Structure formats: C-alpha cells, structure tokens
Image: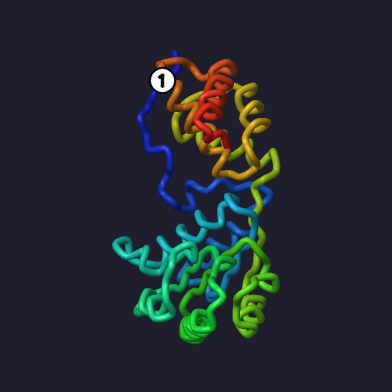
Amino acid sequence: MQQIFDFPMKSAYGFDSFVACDGNAAALQFARRIADPSDAENLLYLHGPSGSGKTHLLQSIARSLCPATADSACYLTCRDSFSARELVGRFCGASALVVDDLHLLPDEAALRAALWQLFNDFYSSGRKVVLAGLLPPRELPHLDDHLVSRLLWGLVARVDATDDHSRRMILKKIADDRQVRVPDDVVDYILMTASREVGALIAAFEALFRLSMSEQRRITLPLARRSRELMQSRGVAP
C-alpha cells in the first residue's frame, strides 16, 4: 500500500528544491553565481512567464545573501503596494536589492526615481542587485530609461518551464518530496488537463494528493479524474 507522509507541500525556497530543466538552466547558473558572495558579478535580471520559477530563484538568492532572520528585508515584490519612501526605507541597510514582478511597478515618477537611486546605490557599492519580471528589460513599461540600459550590463536570462519535459520533471520532483509514487498515466493526465503554469500544475497535484490522503487510497488515474472533477465543481480547476 502507498505510504502517506505528512510533509509540507511547498519546499522552502532554496536552490536544492529548485527543479532544473532545459528552460531554466542558464537562469539557475546565473542565480547561483549572484548568490555566491565571492563571485564578482553583482547584477542579474530574470524574465519569463508567470509560474516559471523566477520567484523561487529570487527568494533563494535573498536567503543566501541576507541573514537567516532577515532574508525578507532584501526581497520585495511589486505585487505589494508601497510609496517611494517605503521602497527606499525597505532596503535601508540591506545587503542586497532583490525586487520581483518588476512589470507591475506602478507608473509613478517618484517610484521610478526611487528605484533608480536604489539601483545606483547598491550597484556602485558592489552589493548584489537582482530583479525579475515577465518581460525582457526593453519591454518593461514603467522603468527609468537609464535603469533599462543598466540592466543589460549584467546577466540576463529567460526562465521558462512550460514545456512538457520540464513540467514532467517538476511533477516527479513534487512526488519525490512527498515520498509517493505517481504512475506515468497519472502524470500524463495532469500534464494534459492542467494549464501550463507551474503553479497550476502544483495545485492539481496538491488536490490529488490531499484526496488520496483523506480517503487513504493509492494515486491512480480514476482518482486523478475524480480529483479534477471535484476541483471543477468548486470552480478551482487549474
């Protein structure tokens, strides 16, 4: 009988829990370089579709560069609301500047100026600067032109794990973390029915795993179909 282990679904953000594949190999290599204090490279920009692993890499870098008790102090996502003053205050005294979801930066002159100033302060002092967004630097809508130009000075990599090979590797990694066996036909079914975003893939597996655990049943194709039907009935099918 399949054993059930009650481990957390989401591994802590770290390089060891990141699933490497063809679509993110360069980004992972660059991220490890930036996270290494002995490496002179201090600028990285990552771009790619939602759910491809950018946030995982950025938070892995922040965890590596910042003290364990303050890794969140050098990481910020533009999904949050903040003023120019709050942006500057957030990184006051931080050992790295790590900003995620840069494509969501509001169209405000004060924020553009504040981010440009922070970039200059960190970059000129040799501290690490890591930024990420959906779009390549030149396509970001609300950045200072000087900052767009500077981003091209450093390491730039696309992160994309939406191909089937990469998604299959991710599912296998999640199953291994849970210490459960997932038959190939179940993997194929999830790949076929879930959207291409990695987050949706994980949500589909999580729902299936929880159903398997609650009913003390092995993960099989019929159970996977039932899990998807339950998600659809709740309006949450990925």
Residue at point 64% right, 72% down? 141
Q: Tell which of 159 and 19 is nearer to you.
A: 159
Q: Within the image, what quadrant is residue 87 found in?
A: bottom left
> Is residue 25 among what the camera can see?
no
Residue pictured at 45% horizontal, 17% vertical: 2
Quarter that holds the N terminus:
top left
> Looking at the picture, which amino acid does disc 1 mark?
Gln
Residue appearing at x 53%, y 75% in the figure: 42
| Label 1 secondary element | loop
Is residue 83 toward the left or the right of residue 140 in the image? left
Residue 66 placement (x, y as % from top left): 37, 67
Colour scheme of the picture: rainbow
- Residue 91 position (above or below residue 49): below
Q: Is residue 43 above or below residue 196?
A: below
Residue drawn at 36 percent across, 63 percent down = 71
Decide if residue 184 is in sight here. Answer: yes
CA neighbours of label 1 inside 10 A, class few (<14), some (14 to 19), many (20+)? few
Measured as percent of width and height from the top left, residue 8 is found at: 38, 38
Asked if residue 166 is positioned above or below residue 187 in the image, the reply reads: below
Residue at the left extreme, as displayed: 69
| Residue 234 locus on image (x, y percent) | 50, 30
Q: Is residue 23 left or right of residue 114?
A: right
Q: Position of residue 163 (x, y in %)?
A: 70, 43
User: Which residue lies under the disc numbered 1?
Assistant: 3
The image quarter containing residue 154 is bottom right
Give the number of marks. 1
Considering the image in quadrants, where does the C terminus appear?
A: top right
